[in-house]
Amino acid sequence: MKGKFLIMSILAALLVGSNAMASIARVSVFGTQPVFTAQASGMSVVSANGSLWYDDDYNVFYNPAYINDTKNRISVEKGVEGGFFKGEFENFAYGVYFNRGGNGTTGIGTSSNAQSVYGGSLVAPGFNPSAWIGTAENLPTQRPIDLFVGGDTGLKWGLHLAWAYDRDQTVAVGPSFSGGEVTNRYWHLDGGVQVMGLEPYAGITAFSKYQNNGPNPATASIDEVNVGARYKYEGWCPYVSFEKTRVDGSPAQNNGVQNQTRVSDFGFGLSHDTKVADGVHIYKNVGLWWAWYQDDLGTGQTQSIAGIGAAASSAATAATNLTGDDNNQYTDIVLPVNIAIEADAASWLTLRAGASYDFINDRNYASNNNQASAVAQVSNRHTSGLGNTKFRIGSTLKFGKLHVDSAFGNGSANQNLTGASSRSSLDNNALGFDSQTFALVSVGYHW
């Protein structure tokens, strides 16, 4: 009986768990900016790998200048990833982070991407081109690594390099395993500064390519640029961000049209951190985002104009769907609203909760050109997306400088987020004190 009481006490402590900048578990509770997914290829992109509207350790992945504020720490995340950040000579810092994105399953172009690992919060480094080339030799990148260096020399600055790689030379192109090789590599570089409250950053993905010279020869490459800035004044934080991602590949499909998907998103917003009492903060955010798509996957669209996942007979579907479109162009407009609270329940315990809601989530099909079927051409058709609606809770349990962060959910967070029936288990209605209680757990030590 005493043992059961002790276990329940520890679980309760974790659930009602400092305003210390934390981890993936904290980010998944508070939420981030929208994730945009091209409907045919499944390519998912996010403007920044962290949050633009509040401070967190994870923001170092889009503005490495933050390493000056989060140095001298080590973190380990459920999902087998983690790293350390160390300061030197008071003015310089460096860091290394391993396996961001869990098992290196990549964050772009796969239905089980890293955004679902974190409950729709983050997109990790990597590249999985299977959605474009459709080859049997699917080879996602593995074991990503992130390297950081920064300093405070009048202004705070930082640089970040992300790399991931995979290779398979056992692909048979003849009677023996000879001559066949599949490789996949990913490179991303970004930098940022902090000066007088202004925090600009910029990044680029280049030299990232999938190459297959086996029985199913194919290539695919990814290019990305992103820029943005935050400005902090007292508790206010306006921000702006632009990101553009392009993936292309061969062989060509559908009448010689090359596979290509492009997503560009632009957004801005305003957040505020209100300190209502010692150790108690309320965070509010409102943003406005546009995303432009050109999704030339070449397999045709099956998206009903009547709505995502709408049921229809085959005749009605043929009459209303954007079917057989080789150059499907459309635009998303999203207006997200976020509110979160974080409070010190005790010197060893912090509670947090976050709610997210898309007040507007609209997709407009601009045109349906290069028809590959007999469906009549349509233009300026709208559909409302599922959007982002969630409420989550989490905690931090502190043992001196050792912090254990958690996000309450139903065990694994490895579920796809593309539909209401497959939402992340962080939003599952089932609750309970068992082995499936914590979907995310992070352990960090600051010194």
Image (cartoon, rainbow, N blue to C red):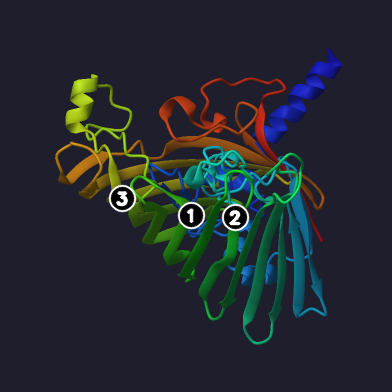
Q: Are the residues at dot 1 and dot 2 in contact (C-beta closer than 8 Å)?
A: yes
Q: In this view, does 54 lie above or below 40?
A: below
Asked which quadrant contains residue 426, the reply is: top right
- Marks 1 and 3, Cα distance to the nearest angstrom? 24 Å
Q: Which amino acid does label 3 sit on?
A: Asp
- Which residue corresponds to the image point at 82% horizontal and 61% vertical from the top-left? 447
- Residue 249 is marked as 1
Residue under numbered circle 3 = 332
Q: Which amino acid does label 2 sit on?
A: Tyr
Nearest-to-viewer mark from 2 and 3: 2
Observer-nearest of 331 and 427 = 331
Residue under numbered circle 2 = 210
Q: Which residue lies furthest to the front in this view?
A: 175
Query: Whole-percent x and y of residue 135?
Result: 55, 41
- Which residue corresponds to the image point at 76% horizontal and 70% vertical from the top-left? 94
Observer-nearest of 97 and 9 = 97
Q: Is residue 195 above or below residue 249?
A: below
Q: In which quarter of the image is the N terminus?
A: top right
- Marks 2 and 3, Cα distance to the nearest angstrom? 29 Å
363 sits left or right of 172 in the view: left
